[in-house]
Structures are given as C-alpha cells and as structure tokens.
C-alpha cells in the first residue's frame, strides 16, 4: 500500500471508535482497543490466521510510524484493516509467483469452535472479494456505505457481492445438512 494514508476513504467506522476520538488518542490505547478485532476480521477475510497475524502486525506498525496523521483520520481502524488486507493480498500474490499451489490445496486456517466449523468452511470457499464484503457487513457490522468506503467499491458492488456471497453460503450450508 505504500505510504498512502487516504484509504479507506470516507467517514466509515470499520471498528467501534475508542471513547477518546480526539487527535490525542494514544497509539497504545488504539492498539489495545482494536488489534484483536482487526486480526479476527483479517483472518476471516484472507482465510489464514498466521497471515492475518502478520498483516495485522504490519498494518499496526505502519499506523504507529504515521500515528500523528493516522489518529486524525475519521476512521483509523478502517485504515489499519485496509492496510492489513492490502498487505495480505500482496503477500499471497508473491507466494503464488514463487510457489504455485499444489493441486486442490487451500491455505489452512486455525480451527474455529465446532459450532462455527461449517460456516467457516463455507466462507473460505467463497472468492476473496465476496468473503471480504461479508466480513465487513456481518463481522464488523458495517453499513453498505461504510463497507464501500473501506473496500473502495461502489455501494452497488457491495450489495451485489453480499447478495451473491450470502446465497452461496446458504447453498453450501444447506448441502452440509
């Protein structure tokens, strides 16, 4: 993502803001309030908890290095999520160039609790573009407009990807039963 601080655009609240939304919010407080939720969202979006941890760490390090500017953004949590998502996407591209995946192999993710195993498996089968929209809308509880701003999409694209992704999830879960 480079040193660009404009993503995500707009006033979307990807994560609940800290009680202190002033420009004096300390990075330490921001980190404590957001790191776990950003990691969980990235883990679902990219389908690999280890890559998500590295992406979260990298995004937080970039936020720390630019904290004087990042803390003044309307949505520092959204910025960190997007930076982490971009980092993970770049990482996967690099890995695919260096080592083509084995036939039928999907990146392994840490096993969730047994109640969510079927849903997690079905979610991992979705294309990343639909999975990311579902994570933003369902896990992070963002509105369509907020999701569009964070992912730099139009609201129509968000609605379309959400509708198709949820339909594919329903179909996959119905097959499981």
Image: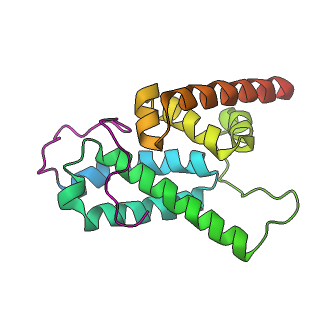
Q: Quadrant of the N terminus?
A: bottom left
Residue in the image at 62% along x and 31% along y: 161
15 falls in the magenta region: yes
| Above/below status of 101 relative to 126 | below
| Above/below status of 95 relative to 7 | below
Instruction: Decide if residue 69 is on the left or right side of residue 40.
Output: left
The answer to which quarter of the image holds residue 100 is bottom right
Query: Mainly helix, strand or loop, the magenta region?
Result: loop
Residue in the image at 32% along x and 38% along y: 10
Position of residue 108 measured from the top left corner of the image (x, y, whole percent): 71, 57
Task: Check the image and name the residue furthest to the right.
Answer: 103
Give the total of numbered labels.
Answer: 0
Instruction: Decide if residue 139 is on the left or right side of residue 4.
Output: right
| Above/below status of 66 relative to 154 | below
Instruction: Decide if residue 70 is on the left or right side of residue 13.
Output: left
User: Magenta part of the protein: which range?
Assistant: 1-25
Position of residue 176 measured from the top left corner of the image (x, y, whole percent): 84, 29
| Above/below status of 118 relative to 82 | above
Position of residue 17 measured from the top left corner of the image (x, y, whole percent): 27, 38
Instruction: Decide if residue 25 is on the left or right side of residue 88.
Output: left
Residue in the image at 31% along x and 56% along y: 5
Position of residue 77 measured from the top left corner of the image (x, y, whole percent): 34, 46
Task: Check the image and name the residue furthest to the bottom.
Answer: 98
105 falls in the magenta region: no
The answer to which quarter of the image holds residue 14 is top left
Q: Nearer the viewer, residue 153 or 125?
A: 153
Q: Quadrant of the C terminus?
A: top right
């Amino acid at each position: 993502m480079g040193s660009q601080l404009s993503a995500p655009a707009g006033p979307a609240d990807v994560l609940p803001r800290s009680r202190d939304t002033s420009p004096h919010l300390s990075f330490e407080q921001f980190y404590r309030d957001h790191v776990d939720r950003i990691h969980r969202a990235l883990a679902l979006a990219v389908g690999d908890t280890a890559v998500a941890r590295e992406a979260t760490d990298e995004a937080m390090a970039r936020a720390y290095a630019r904290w004087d500017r990042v803390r003044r953004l309307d949505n520092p949590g959204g910025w960190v999520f997007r930076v982490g998502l971009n980092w993970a996407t770049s990482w996967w591209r690099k890995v695919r160039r260096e080592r083509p995946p084995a036939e039928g192999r999907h990146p392994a993710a840490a096993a969730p609790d047994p109640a969510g195993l079927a849903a997690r498996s079905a979610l991992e089968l979705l294309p990343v573009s639909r999975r990311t929209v579902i994570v933003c809308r369902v896990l992070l509880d963002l509105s369509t407009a907020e999701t569009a701003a964070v992912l730099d999409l139009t609201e129509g694209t968000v609605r379309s990807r959400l509708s198709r992704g949820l339909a594919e999830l329903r179909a996959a879960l119905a097959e499981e039963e």
